[in-house]
Amino acid sequence: MRSDASILHLDLDAFFAAVEQRDKPSLRGKPVVVGGVSGRGVVSTASYEARKFGIHSAQPMHEARRLCPNAAYLSGRFGAYRIASRQVMAVLRRLSPLVEPLSLDEAYVDLAAGGVTDFSPAALQKLGEDVRGRVRAVTGGLTASAGIGSSKFMAKLASEAAKPDGLVIIAPGTEAGRIAGLSVRAIPGVGPATAERLQRLGIHTVAELRAATPNELRRELGQLTATWLSALAYAEDDRGVSADREMKSISVEETFAVDLTRLAELEPVAARDGAVVAGRLRKSGAFARTITVKLRLADFTIHTRSRTLLGAVDSDETIAAVAVALLREQQHLLAQGIRLLGVGVSGFTNEAQEALFEVSAARRDESRVTAPTPTVRHAHAGYRAGDDVTHETLGPGWVWGTGLGLVTVRFETAATGPGPVRTFPVDDPALRPTPVLVPDEDEAAGPGWLEE
Ligand code: TTP
Ligand code: MG
């Protein structure tokens, strides 16, 4: 572990929702939920105003609507999120050559590698506030929380404690004491499955983990996990910041309390897991071409089935539909009892190449889905809530709602005050989707939208 607090972790607050509030002045200070608006969709994120109602990431959208029917439900503008992300990463790269992005809105920075030599509390305080201020300036008002500590573990713990819109510095020497009372879930790498195994040993807190005997831990978790857990329980973490760590796959899996045998029980799990994976994919800013469903049977054998699409995708609907199709293709296994179901995506690209996807094609027993006409994600035919549009005479606005062949637009932008609402037929030729181009990295500090 380092003797100086030389690692910074920065994470934007309620990222997707904050971008929406920035660009839609009438939504500032209000509950905003971004996510898949279809039946299977899950919440990507919620503004802090919406979180007060109990809305959170990965929650089914219908549950969120029940908790807060009056929130603004938006389907997301990934071009805008990518632009903001590049602006933020550009700020961090000016601080140090060693920046490790973990997702679109989150990164570690190795301050020592950036030539910082004064790690006094006062100097770090100034540095942290400077960075947060610069992020706010280049993004047009997005707030970030930052943590500074002697390891990745401490830096991230600090930024979580700083949320929202704050800065926390964990002084070297205080690390182990600081985490003793926390839940084991605070330890990086401890997910629901490991936490549950620890719980079986009566271990809930980091202090309890320290008191466990090495034998006990090894028996329950295996040598490898037991070793790193024991180190992290004392805040011993020497993971380096690595600028080129590349993500290769994202997956979620679920072990059932009792083995499941019915397709009707497993399909909703596959669909929900598909949507959760899609959410994480969007968080990382990537698109995936390959979708995999993994089944572990009662006899512990593992069966996987994958499909590679012609286009790269990141939508809840597409990934959930392919996951369900892949599950159906393994239907003959279900009678043996399913212990675990997992959904994963891989084959990442940075560009959207979402090709028109046919659900019927997914049922075909082949590894490729034919995609006849590649279409632009925001096809003109389907305005989605939150999309940017431009009216010939009224100028830029956003889709407030659609239905019954009509589309309602609120004419406001980041630069205006709250604006007026007008309704048009969906095929009104005066109204068009606003084209978005994500600029190259070096242009990232630039203004924002680039129009065609
Ligand atoms: P987070 O940083 O986890 O969440 P957040 O920025 O919305 O809120 P905060 O950090 O203040 O707690 O994720 C960043 C963005 O990634 C989030 O705005 C939306 C997206 N995301 C998903 O799409 N699905 C998810 O399950 C999660 C966790 C995030
Ligand atoms: Mg965040």
Image (cartoon, rainbow, N blue to C red):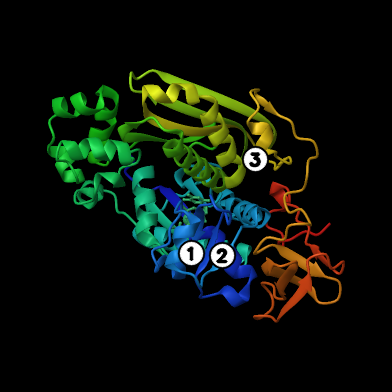
Closer to us: 16 or 259: 259
Mark number displayed over residue 65: 1
Q: Which label sits in the foreground, 2 or 1?
A: 1
Q: Quadrant of the C terminus?
A: bottom right
- The percent coordinates of residue 383 (x first, y second) are 72, 61
Q: Secondary structure at mark 2?
A: strand
Quarter holding residue 447:
bottom right
Q: Amino acid at mark 3?
A: Val
Residue at 53% x, 59% y: name it: 15
Residue tagged 2: 73
Which of marks 1 and 3 precedes in the sequence? 1
Q: Where is 86 relative to 417, above or below? A: above
The amino acid beneath tag 2 is Tyr
Query: For residue 313, which numbered disc appears in the image?
Result: 3
The quarter of the picture where the N terminus appears is: top left
* Mark 3 or mark 2, earlier in chain: 2
Alpha carbons under labels 3 and 1: distance apart: 26 Å
Where residue 110 appears, x then y in whole percent?
A: 46, 44
